Amino acid sequence: MKVLRNPFFAIPLIALLSIVASAAVADELDGLNIADELSAGGTGIPINHDKRVFLELAGGRSLKSTSSPSTFINASFDYWLQHRVNSDWRAIVSGRLDISDGSASSRSEIHTLRELALQWQPTSNSVFDVGRINMQFGEGIGFNPTDVFREGALRNVTSIIPADLRRNRQGTVMLSAQRLWEGGALLGVIAPRIPGNASSDTFSPDLSSTNSRDRVVLSLSQRVGAELTPQLLLVAGRKQSPEIGFNLSALPLAGLVAYGEINVARRPSTLAAIDAWPSDIAWRPQSAVGFTWSLSDSASLTVEHDTDHTGNDNDRDAALMRMPVAMQQVFQQELIRRQRLPDRQQWFLAGLWKDFIMHDNDLYALTRLSDDFSHKQFLVELRHRSGPLTFILRSQWVREKTGENSEITAYELKLLMDRYF
Amino acid sequence: MSNSFSGLASKTRRVLLGSLALAVLPRVSNASANAQELLAQFDALRNPSRPFAFTTTLLEYRDGRQKETLTLRAYASPSVASGQFRSIVWFQAPAQDIGKLMLKDGSNLWFFDPTSKATVRISPQQRLLGQAANGDVVATNFSVDYAARIDGEETIINGERSSVSCTRLALDARTPEATYHHALLWLQRGTSVPVKAQFFVESGILLKTAFYRRLRPVLGADRPTEIVLIDGLDPKWITVMKFDGYAWRDVPETWLQRDYLPRFKPE
């Protein structure tokens, strides 16, 4: 601060700082005037807190290496409704109807019954649920090994975005009881087998897909110290060996959320599960470890490493590539049905930039890359909010290696419009 | 281009103002203990010492017009062990956010969506709406998250546009869950009534200025019922946080954990 002792510098500097300070005060006064108008303007119309409904319209063009280019249009109606019967009981119904039509396929209409459940909460520390419930576990973003009810949950895949895959899925029929205490909870679930086959009828509840066998799940959470709340999961059922799952997350640094989850069980590889490989039941852990870093208040980056030992190793991958295309398609369908990885390892990266270039624009991008780059997914979307409407321009590119020198690529460009009511 | 220029000018202005403050304002030595007490009194004035509920409405003004509005109902309970508040925040509006929940339990901040039933851990620093970060909408005790020292005395314009003689506190984050790296807080001299605050990122850039105003008798004390947030880069970007619907409300301990979020049953 020696410079301030020299009048030659100090006088003009103090004059400059005075001008700057005055401008800052003027800005603050302007801001307070705007705040007065905002504050006096009211807070909007009352809203029913027991429903959330939205309509989505979409259109786009699809390019696949296995077929000619096609155009498509989609309309989706999504609903979540709850009815509070009294202070102890509430009913929930939630679902989604997707209608799609395109130049390369006939019109299809698929309704996904996400939830239809009754909840009884006689005290603040005990809760009972019965019905179809979309129960989810897991800390991972791109892959959730401890999401033990994910098998058969995807009735209609509308996007490769993890949040959409969690939202647009059907729950599992179950009876659950939960006991809560300070800093911890114990949950018990019975999910019975419902005989039958998967159904593609428009309004079929498709219960057999999510309840293909009898299962019992126990979940225990307990806060440890002030920072950590680990969760332990045990799963048992017919036609499966017991599973153990574990979830943990922490905030090691300001703006950095670190998380991890693991599921361990004796089970066959996915290739063996579709009878395309000899029986190979063994300990096959699945895990996801990653972090989400808030680069600023408006930008974040997620980096996650996933492993799945039910995925193909080099031998299985080589065998799959020698198989007929029909068997490769069965393998792909099984991956979607079980929500597993094609190979043993995968990297998942995602970034979100709010107010990208201009206000009301968000940029979101993700990629999934298998360790040998034989499976790649890229997605970039630009979201623009305009009053009650959100416009989304989404570009998605998927590449699957199908042989030593062959691959399937699919590119899709889509414009969506969302409106919540 | 003009935005970039005004942003640069604004940034320069903030750096110059910071230099002026450092050079001119008198220092008060050996007053950290007193500063921490003042900060604790400021906390007590914003947040009652018993479990309570309140509604926050966030109104955003940007690009010359009112934009988004968010309404949240929060249930807060002080933790004897940590001295920090534990809160569950229920999103009531707009339509796309109805039923979502945010839980603050120690350093744990969780976000729950009833449609997907997914619970995701989030950081307090991420922006929620306008200039309001996740950490701004849950009840927090600054005296737990920040180390305070008295930084000077100053007469400033308050949120009602009156001149007020203030004590200025400099706050430095001492936990990762603190929403801001450091901050300046002006309290009305001789009291702990908050007047203004400035929040900074690690590099020293001003993130936002907050004016605490509209003191009203609420739950046994005169408390600010409105905070005006003015963006550090764009002074025409304003967020108003209005607080009302205060009520004493027992918050069961069992509510304040991740496993309860899918079960949350608002009043």
Image (cartoon, helix red, strand yellow):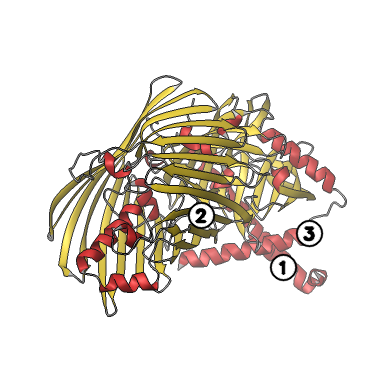
Task: Looking at the picture, tell me which residue is in the foreground, B196 or A270.
Answer: A270
In this rendering, the answer to whether B176 lies above or below A52 is below
Measuring 21% from the left and 48% from the top, which residue is drawn there? A75
Residue picked out by circle 3: B24
Q: Does residue A392 show up? A: no
Q: Secondary structure at mark 3?
A: helix
Inter-mark Cα distance, 3 to 2: 57 Å
Furthest-front residue in view?
Answer: A279
- Using the image, name the chain to which the residue with label 3 belongs: B
Q: How many marks?
A: 3
Residue picked out by circle 1: A13
Furthest-bottom residue in view?
Answer: A405
Inspect the image, locate mark 2, and give the three-letter code of the amino acid beneath it: Ile
Residue picked out by circle 2: A262
In the picture, measured across the screen, residue A341 lies left or right of residue B177, that is: left
Dividing the picture into quadrants, the one containing residue A268 is bottom left
In the picture, measured across the screen, residue A417 lies left or right of residue A4, that is: left
Dividing the picture into quadrants, the one containing residue B204 is bottom right
Q: Quadrant of the C terminus of chain A?
A: top left
Instruction: Same chain for labels 1 and 3? Say yes or no.
Output: no
Inter-mark Cα distance, 2 to 1: 61 Å
